[in-house]
Image: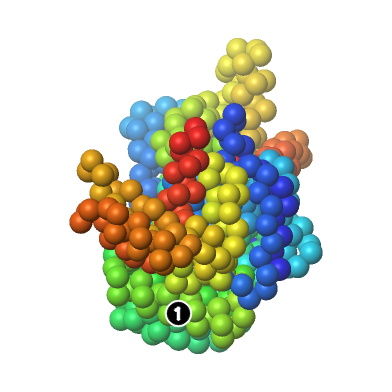
Amino acid sequence: MGIVTVIWEKWVEFRRDFYKITLAAMISPLMYLVIFGMGIQTTSHGEPYLHFLIPGIVAMATMTGSFSAIAQNMSVQRLYEKALDQIMVSPTPLWQFILGQILGGSLRGLYAGGVILLLTWPVRGDLVFNGLSVLIMLLNGMVFSTIALVLSFLAKSYADAPRYTSFIITPMSFLCNTFFSTEQMPAGFRQAVGILPLSQTSAMIRAIANGQPPGWIGFSVLAAYLAVFGLISMVFIYRKKNL
Amino acid sequence: MIELKGLTKKFGDFTAVDQLSLTIGTGEFFGLLGPNGAGKTTTISMMSTVLLPTKGEILIDGVKLDRHATEQKRKLSVITQEYSMRQDMNMEEVMEYQGRLYRMPKKSIREKTDELLEFAGLSDYRRRTVRHLSGGMKRKLMICRALMIEPEILLLDEPTAGMDALSRRQMWNLLRRVNAGRNMTIVLTTHYIEEAQALCGRVALINRGQLQKLDSPETLIRELGPYAVDETAEDDLVSHYFRQRDEAIEYLSRTGESAALRATTLEDVFVVCAGRKLEGR
């Protein structure tokens, strides 16, 4: 199965760069936790701000973990190493390659989120993280892996991958229900930000963490993003004339 | 059998390959020659589905080749001009990745990896990552990877570029063996014209994406004239071609000491063909 082959390839990469990947997954979220959660001691709705922050940071870590695992890697494979040519000419069905990338990227996102869960364990208090949280983290990782795939197929130079991070991932990291609630935003902007996948993921993980049901709207929004970007990536890999 | 039918590739306003039609028989060793920018690599890229044609089609054993054509692609293996490999994998991983992409059983992957790396003299470096290999070693590894799956059709885009003379000769012998022994169809593009002359049963000369000549090297040389007289005139080397040896000797006797008689090569055919086209631009 082509999917297993791609996940094997991701595993080889993970095994080789284990320390780098783990450190990269930890540093930014830890900084945010230390500075915003512990350094600036505040409360939110009568609760320590850290309890608001942790679910958002976990959601953000799955996003950045998945996105960077695919965007950087695929851009390099396509534009620099030309390793994508090997895939294109092989009999592995290209939809399996895409699906393998999405799943592999999602697992990397889950790993990044898992590292944060482990690190925040001593300060988590009563926050709940269960199987449903893991499912949402996986789904979020799949969405951002798919977005990363589409963007890496559009990239025209090696410098584009970091640009996508600056233009897409960084603004989402700060705005999408991670550090503060989107409810505090002005009308119009609030709705626009609220529909973004990270806003939905943060909201769902936070709801579970506080012992509430996540609601199905978030799942539907993530599934819609996954379907749309998944379809675009399929069209690109099968139909794009100059891949 | 490979059939190229009216194959055309445009990049914006630039036409890289223009209505290219030719047939390559099963087991044939076929050369695709042309000056830089002639459209050779673009043609190979379309034959490996990395690029899709703007117009026209490619048939393999009568079935259209596209990115969905899993069964047709199973017959194909390609060695690209650039080192198209994961730079962070080691040799064993590169070979295993290829085997997995073609769904080879694990035992076969191990056996073929051992056999091919041994054959190519790379066994001692099997754990070395690609980025730490020399250019020649990378090239050999790409060949091992391509042969791993025992393809029916091997597409080679400048396979010996960057290799020293000895390695190149070894490569020629290897390619001759797989072509004859396994009846493998080989399509080769190369800048080394003597390579094409030594290996290919037929060659296509293309220029500006268009087919100029298509025949065996011997026939193309015979058409131009098998005897060449090189003459130095005003610091320029000018070659004259003759069908009869006597004509060449007679011409030589009329010129000064600056002329020499020799056998015409495929390179002469190439230079004349490309030169005419350049003059016509």
- Answer with left or right where residue A23 lies relative to residue A48: left
Query: In terms of image quadrants, where is residue B245?
Result: bottom left
Report whether residue B167 is seen.
Answer: yes
Taking depth in this image into account, of A231 and B240 the one nearest to the observer is B240
> Does B261 sit above or below residue B182?
above
Figure label count: 1
Query: In terms of image quadrants, where is residue B174?
Result: bottom left
Taking depth in this image into account, of B256 and A184 the one nearest to the observer is B256
Report whether residue A120 is seen.
Answer: no
- Provide residue B229's location: percent of width, then percent of height: 34, 58
Seen as rendered, the residue at the extreme right is: B62
Taking depth in this image into account, of B247 and A94 the one nearest to the observer is B247
- Provide residue B117's location: percent of width, then percent of height: 40, 80
Q: Please report the residue visible at 40 percent of the width from the left and 66 percent of the height from the top.
A: B246
- Provide residue B41's location: percent of width, then percent of height: 52, 51
- Answer with left or right where residue B113 lies relative to residue A41: right
Residue at the spot of label 1: B174
Q: Please report the residue visible at 52 percent of the width from the left and 30 percent of the height from the top.
A: A168
- The image quadrant where one finds the N terminus of chain B is bottom right
Query: In terms of image quadrants, where is residue B260?
Result: bottom left
Q: Please report the residue visible at 39 percent of the width from the left and 71 percent of the height from the top.
A: B140
- Provide residue B6's location: percent of width, then percent of height: 72, 47
Q: Please report the residue visible at 46 percent of the width from the left and 38 percent of the height from the top.
A: B278
Q: Callout 1: residue from which chain? A: B
* Secondary element at tag 1: helix
The amino acid pointed to by label 1 is: Leu
